[in-house]
Amino acid sequence: MLEEALLAFVHISAILTMFVFLTSAAVLCRGDWLNAAALRRLARVNTLYLACLAITLLTGLARTWWGVKGLEWYWGNYLLHIKLLMLAAMVGLAVGPARSIARWRAALEAGGTLPAADQVRRARLHLMVAAHIGTLIPLPAVFMARGFG
């Protein structure tokens, strides 16, 4: 029981922290005022977002294995699959901006160039869509917690 409570705590903390860094990345990813310092900060924040995304996935999977309801209940529940699809969409949306930010930082360090505003706008759009998808993940979660699925 203690293990389940601690896993739930780490999982929820990872989710909340992930949204802090995702929101921060979306705020920093604005072409109209992105400067060298903001780009370096964006690179760090995006790395932290990706790390929290991975921790969220890993702790969620750990809860299915060691959770009180058991592996069969979780993996037999269609709501878990909906949650995983939403998280997979967030991961898919994170790939493009992560690559772009790494490329922008390398270009900045190599020659001091900043990305074009349209590139930044596209990365921001992906981050914003990911954030909006993420806000829907608690919907199937609360139904699962109440025995649905």
Image (cartoon, grey):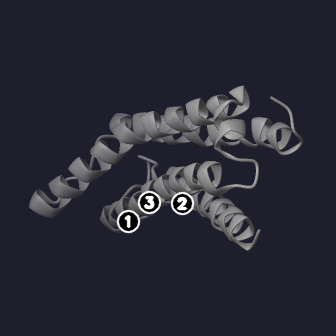
**On the rendered structure, is 102 left or right of 57?**
left
Judging from the image, what secondary structure is the residue with disc 2 in?
A: helix
The residue positioned 17% from the left and 60% from the top of the image is 112
Number of numbered discs visible in the structure rendering: 3
The residue positioned 51% from the left and 54% from the top of the image is 58
| Mark 3 vs mark 2: in front | 3
Q: Position of residue 71 (x, y in %)?
A: 64, 43
- Callout 3: 10 Å neighbours few (<14), some, many (20+)? some
**Circle 2 residue:** 21
Q: Position of residue 44 (x, y in %)?
A: 38, 65
Which quarter of the figure is the C terminus placed in? top right
First in sequence: mark 2 vs mark 1: 2
Image mark for residue 51: 3
First in sequence: mark 3 vs mark 2: 2
Q: Is residue 58 depicted above or below 37 in this figure?
A: above
Query: Is disc 3 in contact with disc 2, using a CB cutoff of under 8 Å?
Result: no
Which quarter of the figure is the N terminus placed in? bottom right
First in sequence: mark 3 vs mark 1: 1
Amino acid marked by disc 2: Phe
Amino acid marked by disc 1: Arg
Label 3 to label 2, Cα distance in Å?
10 Å
Tell me, yes or no, if residue 128 can be seen here.
Answer: yes
**On the rendered structure, is 11 left or right of 46?**
right
Residue 95 sits in which quadrant? Answer: top left
**Circle 1 residue:** 44
The residue positioned 57% from the left and 57% from the top of the image is 59
Q: Is residue 81 depicted above or below 5 in this figure?
A: above
Label 3 to label 1, Cα distance in Å?
11 Å
